[in-house]
Image (cartoon, rainbow, N blue to C red):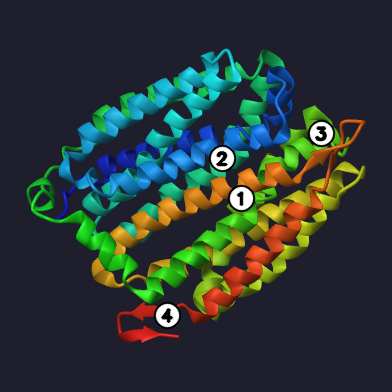
Amino acid sequence: MHTELKPGRELLLLLTLAGIQFTHVVDFMIMMPLGPQLTALFLISDAEFGLLVSAYTFAAGVSGLLAASFVDRFERKRLLLTVYTLFALTTLGCALAPTYGMLMLARVAAGMFGGILSAMTQTVIGDVIPFARRGRATGLVMTSFSLATVMGVPSGLFLANHAGWHSSFIAIAVVCAVVGLAAFFTLPRLDKHVAQARRQNVWFAISGVLADANHRRALAMSCAMMFAAFTVVPYITLYMQANKVLLASEIPLIYLSGGVVTLLTARWIGALTDRIGKRLMFQRMLLLSMLPLTVTTLMQTAPLALVLLVSSSLFFCMNARMIPGMALLTSAAQPQFRGTFMSLNGAVQSVSMGLATWLGGLLIQRNAQGQVTHYWLCALAAVVASLFAYALAQKVKMHTAEGPPAL
């Protein structure tokens, strides 16, 4: 049963949910291009920086899994506002952290609350938006990811380059305060699910998901898909700057150009996925993505236009895998377990991102001149993970409305 809203109120709600997702995504993404500043300031190794990035995703994965056991037992608006307030405070805590250890603790806390927020925004859409309009509503909220890349990260880097790394997190916390105030007025009270949820055994649903071999294959595919990206992506800025491929002032252009490309091509990729099939599109994009993943780790000093062409190709391929990949995952779930399956998938993806980032930090090294070396090993790990995801995708069965699971 859904809580019907007037069209204007519904639009304001969706924009608010997009704002919540935007701040969550920027908070996660901004750490990666801050690598050169943070490694120099705290005198940490690249591996320690990788752990700083992965700590957020590990925490998000754990909290996302735990959230499946309690998120339906509370009224949505109060829980969302509480979690978002705590997220804003932990983000502000990142800005105020005086040491590497304190920053690590703040990142873990921010990841815990961020992981719950990501699941809750999708849940609110399901509660409020009727099925006939839910795809369009989800698309509107999901544009926050592209906007975070196009606007959020470059703006955060501009602040970091001119006012110090702290300013990026302060700015995110300020935006959280504005969005949180909007959420207070736009979110309706949502508590019709509480009575039923308190009678259900959540762990029974989780065990039901994991008992299905097709679910396990799909989750493993999802894990490999995310692993392939995050052995390479978190260290692009470190490599480009340390190896003098780009100047510090040019780094935001990577995210700006890459974000614009994904924003402009997302609908085309979605339409192409529907036309040629989820599995085939996903597998083709996996193979295509191996080229920019590898070239990125081998880049040397080159004209800015060529560097941006390579980096934008990488962003395009990552998004072009993700769209059919997520469509394939959603179709792999048994309908009665779809909500629990997607919650578990979010946790699996977060943990996979953390493991990949941690491994990437261990693989790369520095030479006597301070340049990053062995970055190509990260690409090798990404290629192996991509091939693994390709093989698993071939075996994942899809549930259709017309009949039983189909290969």
**Of callouts 4 and 1, the N-terminal one:** 1
Image quadrant holding the C terminus, namely bottom left
User: Could you tell me which residue is drawn at 7 percent across and 48 percent down?
Assistant: 195
**Of callouts 1 and 3, the N-terminal one:** 3
Do the residues under discs 4 and 3 have CB atoms within 8 angstroms? no
Q: Position of residue 341 (x, y in %)?
A: 34, 62
The answer to which of 366 and 158 lies nearer the viewer is 366
Please give the label number shown on residue 365: none
Please give the label number shown on residue 54: 2
Please give the label number shown on residue 356: 1
- Would you call the spot at circle 2 few (<14 residues within 10 Å), some (14-19), or many (20 or more)? many
Taking the image as shown, residue 52 lies to the left or right of residue 373, namely left
Quote the CA–CA distance across marks 2 and 4.
31 Å
Q: Nearer the viewer, mark 2 or mark 3?
A: 2
| Residue for badge 3 | 241
**Of callouts 2 and 4, the N-terminal one:** 2
Amino acid carrying label 2: it is Ser
Quote the CA–CA distance across marks 4 and 1.
26 Å
Q: Position of residue 74 (x, y in %)?
A: 17, 39
| Residue for badge 4 | 397
**Of callouts 1 and 2, the N-terminal one:** 2
Amino acid carrying label 4: it is Lys
- Would you call the spot at circle 4 few (<14 residues within 10 Å), some (14-19), or many (20 or more)? many
